Structure formats: C-alpha cells, structure tokens
C-alpha cells in the first residue's frame, strides 16, 4: 500500500543539522533515515536511564555505526532511584501486559523522562550550533504519558528558545502521523525494522505482550507491511489479538 506523504518539515525547520533523540526503536529509526534522506546532518543522542530494555541502546549504537552517524550514549543509570516508581526501571516491579489503552500501562511512566532527554539534547544542540532538536513524537502517543501531550511539547519548544542566546527549536515532523503511517514511510525508506527494538522487557526476543510490543504489531498490521520482528514463542498470534481488539487473549 502506497501513501503520498505531505511535506513533513515546515519551513522554519528546514535546517541542515539536528540533534536526534534516538532510542533505536521503530519511530526514531524511521525519523533518522528520513532526516538523512533529506540531506540533514544528524547527531544521535541515546540515554541509559536504568531502563530494563537496555537492548534498545545496543540496537541504536549498531544502526548509527552502520550509517556512519555520530552517536553519543549518555549514562544516567545512577539516577534510576529518581524514577523508581516506574516498571521500566524498577527491577522488583513486573512489566504490565496489554494494550496502551489499559489503565495498568500507567505503571510504565518514567517521571519527566522527555524533559530530561530534551534538556540534554538541547545542550548538545547549543554546543554544536545545531538549530533543532528532533524526536519522533506521533499522533498515537498516549495520554497516559503526560510528557507526550501537546502543551508539554509547546512549552518545551518555548523554553528551548529561551535557555541560550542561540535559538534552538523542537522539531516533531511525525506529530500528525499515526504509528502505522510511520511504518509505511519506513517501508518506503527500506528501514531495517528487524534491527530496531521496542519491547520493554528487554529479553532476547520481543515478548509480543507488553504495551509497546502490541503497538508495534498493530502498526505493521494496519500498515500492511511485513513484520520481521522475532517474538517470543508464547506471544499471542495476530489472529488472537484481533479477536480481542488488540488486548491480550484470556489465558
């Protein structure tokens, strides 16, 4: 299925360099490839904040290396106690399973994560005289994450322009796209989706059951793009998930 994508970058964002907050996941990898295709010089920033799924950082490093893109990994893992109420970092908490629409997914909120990541990226942008910081926020980002909401992003864009004499803007070219549309764009760009990592559990394979795995599977299905992801043997089938409207089937 082919889609004609509108111009994703407004004139104010037509810079030749940017700092990309890069997780190694689907969305940020599509954005990385899209920026490079537009001949924008990209520096990628990844952050270890003590997340259980550190495998995403390995994937991020490998993808950047394969593309010859500068990549910095910042170690904030010693701050994990500041985020200890999140199942993404607390080893004693189990990872909730199911669709993001379920209330249990609030356990995955990492307090103020996006502000921290954007602050670090803004500092690097100022240091390298990059006029923008880019990240792959999209229209399907869920309301359970307060720092994914539009007022937060608008506030950060305003603050980023005030924190230094250099004017740095927040670039969110995917903000009006759904995750399935991002998946379609990635297919057009020949993204190595099998090299990206989403699963919050950080096991050898994607569990296929956590919120981000279900969202990933849903995106491939709706985009009608082949999903090359290797899921755990006990992951529910697509047919089972469709029968339960992408919620996990009853055991």
Image: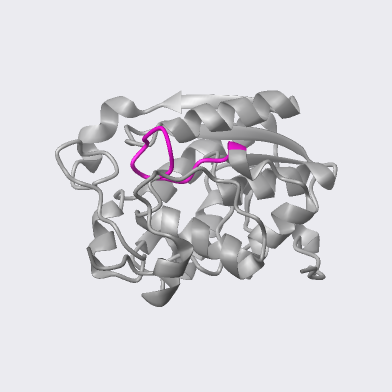
Residue at far left of view: 92
| Residue 186 x, y percent position in the rendering | 71, 53
Residue 196 in the magenta stretch? The answer is yes
Q: Please indicate whether residue 11 sits to the left or right of residue 186 in the image.
A: right
Q: Which residues are magenta?
A: 195-206
Residue 18 in the magenta stretch? The answer is no
| Residue 238 x, y percent position in the rendering | 47, 64
| Residue 75 x, y percent position in the rendering | 40, 24
Q: Indicate whether 161 appears above or below 196.
A: below
Image point (62%, 34%), residue name: 44
Is 40 or 165 nearer to us in this picture? 40
Residue 95 in view of the camera: yes
Q: Please indicate whether residue 7 sits to the left or right of residue 134 in the image.
A: right
Q: Quadrant of the C terminus?
A: bottom left
Q: Indicate whether 36 appears above or below 2.
A: above
Is 208 or 12 nearer to us in this picture? 208
Is 147 or 98 nearer to us in this picture? 98
Image point (81%, 62%), residue name: 11
Q: Main secondary structure of the magenta part?
A: loop
Residue 132 in view of the camera: no
| Residue 34 x, y percent position in the rendering | 75, 49
Q: Quadrant of the N terminus?
A: bottom right
- Residue 104 sits in which quadrant? bottom left
Tell me how the rendering is colored: one colour
Image point (14%, 38%), residue name: 92
């Amino acid at each position: 299925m082919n889609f004609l994508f509108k111009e994703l970058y407004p004139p104010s964002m037509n810079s030749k360099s940017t700092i990309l907050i890069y997780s190694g996941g689907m969305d940020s990898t599509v954005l990385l490839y899209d920026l490079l295709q537009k001949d924008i010089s990209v520096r990628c920033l990844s952050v270890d904040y003590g997340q259980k799924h550190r495998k995403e950082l390995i994937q991020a490093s490998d993808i950047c290396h394969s593309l010859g893109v500068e990549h910095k990994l910042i170690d904030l893992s010693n701050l994990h106690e500041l985020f200890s109420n999140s199942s993404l970092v607390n080893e004693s908490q189990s990872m909730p399973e199911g669709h993001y629409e379920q209330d249990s997914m609030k356990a995955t909120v990492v307090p103020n994560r996006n502000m921290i990541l954007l602050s670090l990226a803004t500092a690097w942008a100022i240091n390298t005289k990059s006029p923008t910081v880019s990240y792959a926020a999209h229209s399907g980002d869920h309301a359970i994450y307060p720092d994914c909401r539009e007022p937060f992003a608008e506030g950060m864009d305003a603050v980023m322009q005030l924190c230094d004499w250099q004017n740095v803007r927040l670039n969110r070219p995917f903000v009006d796209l759904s995750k399935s549309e991002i998946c379609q764009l990635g297919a057009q760009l020949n993204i190595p989706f099998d090299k990206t990592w989403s699963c919050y559990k950080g096991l050898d394979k994607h569990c296929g059951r956590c919120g981000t795995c279900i969202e990933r599977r849903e995106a491939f299905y709706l985009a009608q793009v082949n999903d090359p992801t290797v899921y755990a043997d006990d992951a529910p089938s697509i047919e089972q998930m469709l029968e339960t409207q992408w919620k996990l089937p009853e055991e």
